[in-house]
Image (tube, rainbow, N blue to C red):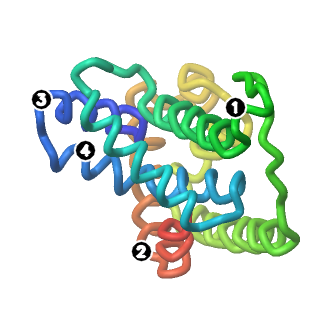
């Protein structure tokens, strides 16, 4: 189950009053929402206050909100709306804020360097993990994800049955996931994101 589907499932469970599911949503989205709001306000306290308000309001109004197709987008949209409202109140209504008004988010040199370093290290880890795959899986992963072939094309070229191609690609992805998740650097990067 991908992250989006998992968030949707947790939201459906939260609609039924499951506090643990809402807690999972909080755990998953809080860091990225906080980073987003911190870029807007450049103030930790304001960002945390708005996030606290966001999660409380969404929990209290979950029945009124109902099903959400994309939970992450909905939470970001709500956080953005709360940020607009905060700025509107703070400016004493002297500036009319509209939904199409843009926030002035600035990137620091450190963030750019960190992302570049993380990308380089993750690429190195992926390369190492790819080279540990068996030859057949390596070939099929290459054709599928690096050359963009579909499973039928791979089956035709390699002379292997369609289902065997699917199975080999699936096993290769599982092995890559296991290799990458077991790496301590990768675990630290995932926690930071």
Mark 3: few, some, or many residues within 10 Å (few <14, many ≥20)? few
For the residue pair 141 and 180, the one nearer the viewer reads as 180
Task: Work out whether mark 2 precedes mark 3 in sequence or the reverse, and give the earlier one.
Answer: 3
Q: CA distance from mark 1 to mark 3?
A: 42 Å
Task: Kindly identify which residue carries mark 3.
Answer: 16
**Residue 98 sits in quarter:** top right
Task: Kindly identify which residue carries mark 2.
Answer: 182
The dot on residue 148 is 1
Q: CA distance from mark 2 to mark 1?
A: 27 Å
Residue 80: percent from left, percent from top? 60, 37
Quarter holding the N terminus is top left
Residue 185: percent from left, percent from top? 55, 79
Task: Work out whether mark 2 precedes mark 4 in sequence or the reverse, and give the earlier one.
Answer: 4
Q: CA distance from mark 1 to mark 4?
A: 38 Å
Task: Work out whether mark 1 precedes mark 4 in sequence or the reverse, and give the earlier one.
Answer: 4
Residue displayed at 59% across by 22% down: 156
């Amino acid at each position: 189950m991908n992250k989006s589907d998992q968030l949707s499932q947790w939201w459906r469970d939260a609609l039924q009053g499951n506090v643990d599911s809402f807690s999972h949503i909080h755990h998953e989205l809080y860091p990225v929402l906080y980073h987003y709001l911190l870029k807007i306000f450049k103030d930790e306290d304001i960002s945390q206050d708005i996030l606290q308000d966001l999660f409380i309001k969404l929990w209290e109004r979950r029945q009124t909100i109902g099903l959400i197709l994309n939970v992450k987008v909905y939470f970001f949209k709500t956080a953005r709306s709360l940020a607009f409202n905060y700025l509107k109140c703070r400016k004493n209504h002297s500036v009319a804020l509209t939904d199409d008004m843009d926030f002035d988010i600035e990137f620091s040199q450190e963030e750019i360097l960190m992302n570049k370093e993380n990308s380089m290290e993750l690429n190195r880890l992926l390369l190492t993990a790819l080279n540990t795959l068996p030859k057949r899986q390596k070939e099929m992963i290459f054709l599928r994800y690096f050359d963009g072939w579909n499973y039928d094309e791979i089956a035709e070229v390699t002379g292997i049955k369609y289902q065997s191609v699917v199975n080999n690609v699936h096993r290769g992805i599982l092995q890559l996931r296991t290799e990458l998740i077991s790496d301590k650097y990768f675990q630290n990067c995932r926690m930071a994101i």
